[in-house]
Amino acid sequence: MTRTIVFLFLLGLGTFACTVQQESAQVANTSGDDFLGQWDVTVQGKETTYPSWFEITRQDDQLTGRFVGRVGSARPIQMLKVNGNQLTFSLPVQYESNPEDIRFEGQLAQGKIEGTTKAADGSTLTWTAVPAPSLERTSPPNWGESIDLLSGSISDHWHARSPEAPDNWTLSDGVLASSATGTDLVTNQKFGDFRLHIEFKYPKESNSGIYLRGRYEVQILDDPGEEPTSVGLGGLYGFLTPTVKAGKPAGDWQTYDITLVGRRVTVNLNDQTIIADEEIPGITGGALDSDEGAPGPIMLQGDHGPISFRNIVLTPAR
């Protein structure tokens, strides 16, 4: 094919040859294949950046997708169009205060997508999406020395996520507690693969969570009597649903044993395996960032209600 085009060009039919090449390229891009997969998004807000995530798949020759915003859970993309290297999609409001569906427009170039969206007040925000890493591991982890994340004072291992929010965290007799809605708490140290043992207790109707690498929330929620859901106790928020109901009543101490290797997670709740070596698709709402390929901290959610923790021990992979 290449030789034929070159030969025609030499005969003075270069315009025809170039037209064929351009049309072929446009058809290839319009198929949408270049947009398939999971994308880690950084949105440039008015005062700071914040993370998002989306996934585009093909079902029955139609492009479809789901999206995770700054807060909330994964939701279906309502409208999705590809035209050449241009991507447009919209989705319904979840917890945002936008007056109508949220619309994203972007252009694919050099392996990333750059575009714009609208803030709740109508101002234009810019965003960049890069392909999410697979995080596949070629060998099992070699575990290192365990770290007691409650040894010493709070500041030895933790800092507040939001200096502007109330800091209600105290550490007394080995119990780390937040007495009321306030700031989240983030470890000073960042981790790649790890095993985490953590015990927790909450009052009735309270809500918290544990963010793995600061990106993937394992939910803590008082939801007695309900069937397991991805947004309930033990769920990987909005993505992975526990196989069994293993929670205890509010006011009782409970235990998570969590192993995270790459993006594969195993969660044991009160000595029962509720998520067994499942793959986390992407970041969850409330994540610190969307840089999935980098190590990240443990974050304890304190902005939803009272919560107590004890015996927080992390064993990192070497």
Image (tube, rainbow, N blue to C red):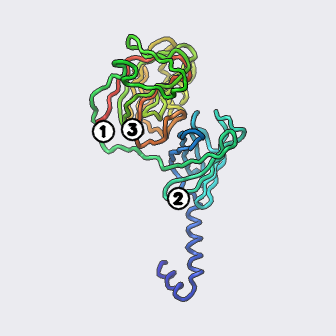
Mark 3 or mark 2: name the one nearer the start of the chain.
2
Answer few, some or many: residues within 10 Å of disc 3's Cα (few below 14, many 20 plus, some between 14 and 19). some
Percent across and percent down for residue 35 are 54, 54
- Please name the amino acid that badge 1 sits on: Pro
Mark 1 or mark 3: name the one nearer the start of the chain.
1
- Please name the amino acid that badge 3 sits on: Pro
Percent across and percent down for residue 13 are 57, 85
Which residue is at 62% across, 59% downward?
83
Judge from the rendering whether residue 120 lies leftward or rightward of residue 207; answer left or right: right
SS label for mark 3: loop
SS label for mark 1: loop
Percent across and percent down for residue 254 are 44, 17
Percent across and percent down for residue 174 are 38, 13
Q: Nearer the viewer, mark 2 or mark 1?
A: 2
Which residue is at 53% across, 33% downward?
286
Q: Nearer the viewer, mark 1 or mark 3?
A: 3
- Please name the amino acid that badge 2 sits on: Ala
Q: Residue furthest right?
A: 99
Q: Is residue 142 depicted above or below 304 in this figure?
A: below
Mark 2 or mark 1: name the one nearer the start of the chain.
2
Answer few, some or many: residues within 10 Å of disc 2's Cα (few below 14, many 20 plus, some between 14 and 19). few
Dot 1 corresponds to which residue?
140
Dot 3 corresponds to which residue?
295
From the viewer's side, name the closer residue of 104 and 154. 154
Kindly indicate whether the residue at mark 2 contacts the one at mark 3 (C-beta within 8 angstroms).
no
- Measured in 3D between alpha carbons, the distance from the residue under mark 3 to the one under mark 2, in whole angstroms, is 27 Å
Q: Which mark is residue 314?
A: none
From the viewer's side, name the closer residue of 134 and 128. 128
- Measured in 3D between alpha carbons, the distance from the residue under mark 1 to the one under mark 3, in whole angstroms, is 17 Å
Judge from the rendering whether residue 229 lies leftward or rightward of residue 92; answer left or right: left
Dot 2 corresponds to which residue?
109
Question: Splitting the image into 4 quarters, where does residue 18 fall?
Answer: bottom right
